Image: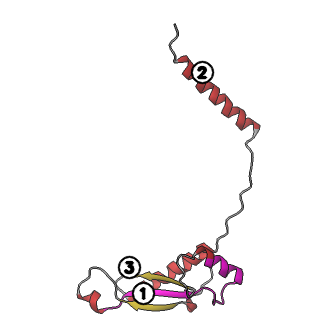
Amino acid sequence: MKDFSTEISYKTSRSSGAGGQNVNKVETAVTAMWNVMETQFFSFDEKLRISEKLKNRINSEGLLQMTSSESRTQLQNKKIVTEKMLELVEKSLFVPKKRLATKPSKGQIQKRIDNKKKLSEKKENRKFRF
């Protein structure tokens, strides 16, 4: 995992919700912003993959934004949002392996047909005959 946290810029704001006077005067919510296309840590292909996978989270200026207001302290929220962003970008870089199409073996096909026949016979035996 590449640590690009040096390129992340932070902005603070007041957290919403309950909390009394402390919420009204202390800016504890932290928004992390990272410009995907101007990063030095990833290749062009990786930047395109990140942009494609996270297009719903990237704004028109090309900034990936995340906000955290979970904790009561600004420092803890900054740590949380940085970890989340690093994890999100790492997941977006994952390339799944191509699936190889396979056929069921003859034994598997025969076993399935035998089971169907057994079930059919069982249901046939339940019928009332005159």
Instruction: State the residue position of label 2.
Output: 121
Q: Position of residue 103 (x, y in %)?
A: 75, 45
Q: Position of residue 86 (x, y in %)?
A: 55, 80
Total numbered badges shown on the rendered structure: 3
Residue closest to the far top:
130
The image shows residue 18, relative to residue 8, as above or below, that is above
In the image, what residue occupies the spot 53% across and 75% down? 56
Instruction: State the residue position of label 3.
Output: 70
Which is nearer the eye, 69 or 53? 53
Instruction: State the residue position of label 1.
Output: 30
Disc 1 element: strand
Disc 3 element: loop
The quarter of the image holding the N terminus is: bottom right
First along the sequence among labels 2 and 3 = 3
The image shows residue 96, relative to residue 62, as above or below, that is above
Q: Please name the amino acid that badge 3 sits on.
A: Glu
First along the sequence among labels 1 and 2 = 1
The magenta stretch is: 26-51
Q: Is residue 80 left or right of residue 22?
A: right
Q: Is residue 68 left or right of residue 58?
A: left
Q: Is residue 78 left or right of residue 121?
A: left
Q: CA distance from mark 2 to mark 3?
A: 61 Å
Q: Position of residue 70 (x, y in %)?
A: 38, 79
In the image, what residue occupies the spot 57% across and 91% down? 7
Q: Which mark is residue 9?
A: none
In the image, is residue 36 part of the stretch drawn in magenta? yes
Q: Please name the amino acid that badge 1 sits on.
A: Val
